[in-house]
Structure formats: C-alpha cells, structure tokens
Image (spheres, rainbow, N blue to C red):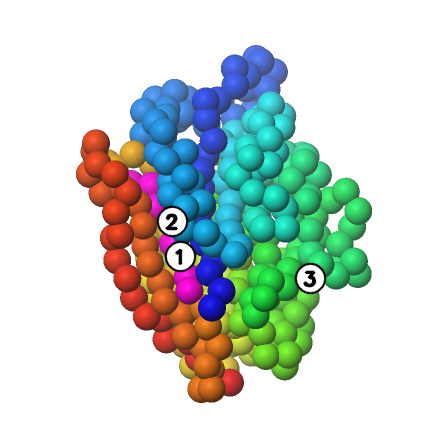
Amino acid sequence: MFRLAHFSDPHLGPLPDPSLWQLASKRVLGYMNWRGNRLRSMGGDYLARLLDDMDAARPDHIALTGDLVNIALPAEIAAARDWLTAVAAPERLSVVPGNHDAYVPGALKSAMQAWSDYMTGDDDAMTHTGSAHFPFLRRRGPLALVGVSTAKATAPGFASGRVGVRQTRRLTETLAGLGEAGAFRVVMIHHPPFKGATSWAKRLEDASRVRAAIKRSGAELVLHGHTHIDSRTMIEGPNGPVPVIGVPSASHAPGGRKPGARYNLFDIAKTDGGWTCHLEERGFIEIGGGIEVIDRAELVIPSR
C-alpha cells in the first residue's frame, strides 16, 4: 500500500508589508482582500495543526496543488521556500503553482526558481536546471505524479488558468507512456478541469484540452485545489470515468462560507484486477474543535 496526502491553497500569512510601488498593480486589490477578509478567515493556526496531523498519518508522499502565497510579493515567495523546507524534503513533497503564485507578471518565474526543487521531475530530459518545467514527472513507488501548471498572471478581477497546447501535448504523451508501464497515474493541477467547476472569471480556460488528454491517454486520479471546497466528480477516460478530487484551503477557519481546513489521504494498492484507492478526508468542522475524520470512501479506479 502507498499512502498519498493531498492539500492545497495554504495562502501563507502573515502578508509582508508591501511597498507603494509593489501595490501599483493588481496587488492592491489582493492586499485589500487580505486585510479585509483573509486575515480573519486564514490567520489562525489551522494550517500548522493540519500539517501536524498529516505528519502523524505518515504519508509516503505529499501533493500540494498551488496558491502557496497571496499576492506573490518577493518576500512571500522567499518565505514560502523556507516553509516548504519545514514541511518536507523535495523528494517527499511535490508542488504545482496556482494563480496566486502568478499574481502579477514575473511572479511565476520567481516562484518556479525559488521552489524548483519541489517542481522538478525525475527525468533530466524533462527539466531545466534551476527552474521548473511542466508537466513534470515523479515516480514514487507504484505512483507516477504528473505535475501540470495552470498558473498565469491575469487582469484584475480574474483568477483563470491555462495549460496551453505544448504542455497538453506533453501531458498526453506522458500519460500514455505511463499507462503502458502500468503506473498509477496522479495528475496534479491547480484549476479543476471539469465542466462548471468555477465561475467564468476563475475557470480553467482550456479545460477541454486537459479532459481530451485524459480521455485519450487515461489517468487513475486527478487532484486539484483553487475552489476552496471539497468536491468529487469524474471525467471521461479511455477505460471508464477518472476520479477528480478537490480539497478546501488548508488554512481556512471553520464556521465560514467555505469549509474549514482539510486534507485528504489516499491509500493506494495494486490488485489482480487493477487498483484500490481508499480516501479519508480529515479536517476541521467546528470552531474550537479539533481535526476529525470527515468522510471515508472507496474510489472506483478505471481498469486497463
């Protein structure tokens, strides 16, 4: 059995004090949102407690699907690097970026350089020294983690993402090869790729490309963040529906409009007939309460 933990959207705080020139952009809106909303809803110790619980669960690997920072200040990106180091070694933690990590032009490049150890594939042919290259591929036991980037800088009022033609082509080829090798393929992506997942301004613009890649080449599991809610759905694969699992923000306080901080554990095992995958959802439900088991489920994994 292989145990995979998944969490997302920590939106690390507190937010450093920006300079006036740093606020002369879309960042001013994000800064106002932090001060007026997220400081209250994400300013507690829920993330630290969640990570302690996750560590006690002893996962073999951890997947983090983006939005480490808020408005992508250089100080935020550097602090996130230190935080990643404290969470787990790069060999045990894989990261893909979210839209907040690419909040303004140039931010994504800085984030990918700072966090490249956590976004670097095992195959040197798929990586660039000192930076990240997508989709990246990491083999961990029976799992093949395929990291897809949807992060891009957007105009004020937008939080959309895009994969692009070249990355989609590589994704299709990578998934096909891994399928032939018999791996349990886990696609990590920030924006959800299924229809109707978000509002128009927050959508994955070319989600149909991702769905087409999975329909053609297959996958066993898709993990995403972005929506700050727990969700389970399916998208079409060549051998049956592929589970798509979303998780709430890992730092959100319970009792609000969005669910409290949560993470998911997946226990994955190979069987004669294919794969088994047990999901356990853990997190906060009530204000002042501790971490609880919120739900358990057996996911149906398409057979090849």
Residue on which disc 2 sits: 263
Residue located 78% across and 58% down the image: 124
Q: Residues within 10 Å of mark 3 (few under 14, many from 20)?
A: few
Query: Is 66 placed above or below 178 here?
Result: above
Task: Using the image as rendered, state which of residue 119 and residue 110 is in the foreground.
Answer: 119
| Residue 181 percent coordinates (x, y) | 64, 79
Q: Disc 1 and disc 3: Cα gap in Å?
A: 32 Å
Q: Earlier in the sequence, mark 3 or mark 2?
A: 3
Q: Nearer the viewer, mark 1 or mark 3?
A: 1
Three-letter code for the amino acid on which mark 3 is drawn: Arg
Q: Disc 3 and disc 2: Cα gap in Å?
A: 31 Å
Prevailing secondary structure of the magenta residues: strand
Query: Is 33 placed above or below 177 here?
Result: above
Could one spot residue 114 in this view of the protein?
Answer: yes
On screen, residue 272 versus residue 91, left or right, reads left
Task: Using the image as rendered, state which of residue 71 and residue 243 is in the foreground.
Answer: 243
Task: Assign a secondary structure to mark 2.
Answer: strand
Residue located 31% across and 50% down the image: 282
Q: Quadrant of residue 135?
A: bottom right
Residue located 29% across and 66% down the image: 297
Q: Are marks 2 and 1 in contact (CB under 8 Å)?
A: yes
On screen, residue 145 versus residue 122, left or right, reads left
Numbered range of the magenta stretch:
259-267
Residue on which disc 3 sits: 166
